[in-house]
Image (cartoon, grey):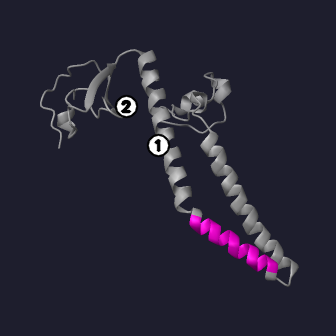
Amino acid sequence: MTQILQSRSTTADETMVYFVNKFTGEIRLSPDNRISDPYKLGWNPAEWGMFEAKTAREKDSISARMAEQLWKKKKDMEVSRFMREQETRNMMRNSAKIRQARSPSKLDYDLNQRVLDKIDADEDKFYRLLCEEFDPAKRTSGLEIEWSSASTSYWGRRGEKAQGLNG
């Protein structure tokens, strides 16, 4: 359990404190901007370096790097899931082809063809994922207010449901 004994902050409230792993390059945000020692978080101080982002440009840069880091982690998880399921997928494909060859009715043939099409579509999706690169313009991390423009005038918001405390 991390304890912060001082009531005054050693950094300004606008400062974002984050840690970077010296070996892997992984970025983790500090849970509190007063924590500057990774040992207090249960991390090895020899592996983690503490940094501060003070300006909006620095914060946006860190945000983009963290978004890329999370995207790569998600991509790796999807690839490993696909590889784990590959044997089952091959068995399903083979059994669907056998059932398709044996089926006396057109409906059975079409149903097995749908199974084969679904497996092929999953493989195409996997190969597209393998070739895909991180695009910072497609980031979805951001405030909801930043996603679309809205009118601030009374007439522009007229007829909308009241939101928030000020309604």
Q: Main secondary structure of the magenta part?
A: helix
Examine the rendering and report whether any part of residue 165 can be seen: no
Above or below: residue 85 compared with residue 155 = below
Q: How many marks?
A: 2
143 horizontally vs 29: left or right: right
Residue occupying image coordinates x 70% and y 51%: 124
Q: Which residue is mark 1?
A: 73
Q: Which residues are magenta?
A: 87-101
Q: Position of residue 118 (x, y in %)?
A: 72, 62
Instruction: Name the outermost residue toward the bottom.
Output: 104
Above or below, comparing residue 146 to residue 128 in the picture: above
Location of residue 137 by image quarter: top right
In this rendered view, identify the residue nearer to me: 78 or 84.
84
Q: Nearer the viewer, residue 128 or 156?
A: 128
Name the amino acid type tagged 2. Answer: Gly
Assess whether residue 64 is covered by the magenta stretch.
no
Q: Which residue ends up furthest to the left in the rendered image? A: 5
Q: Which residue is mark 2?
A: 25
For the point 75% across and 73% down, the residue is 97
Residue 49 sits in quarter = top left
Query: How far across and how far down the image is residue 101, in percent?
Result: 81, 78
Amino acid type assigned to the residue bearing label 1 in the image: Lys
Lower position in the chain sequence, tag 2 or tag 1: 2
Is residue 39 something one can see in this rendering? yes
Crowd rating for badge 2 (residues with CA inside 10 Å; few <14, some 14–19, many 20+)? few
**Mark 1 neighbour density, 10 Å: few (under 14) some (14–19) many (20 or more):** few
Residue 17: give x, y in percent of width and height. Answer: 30, 25
Secondary structure under the numbered disc 2 in the rendered image: loop
Rendered image: mark on residue 142: none
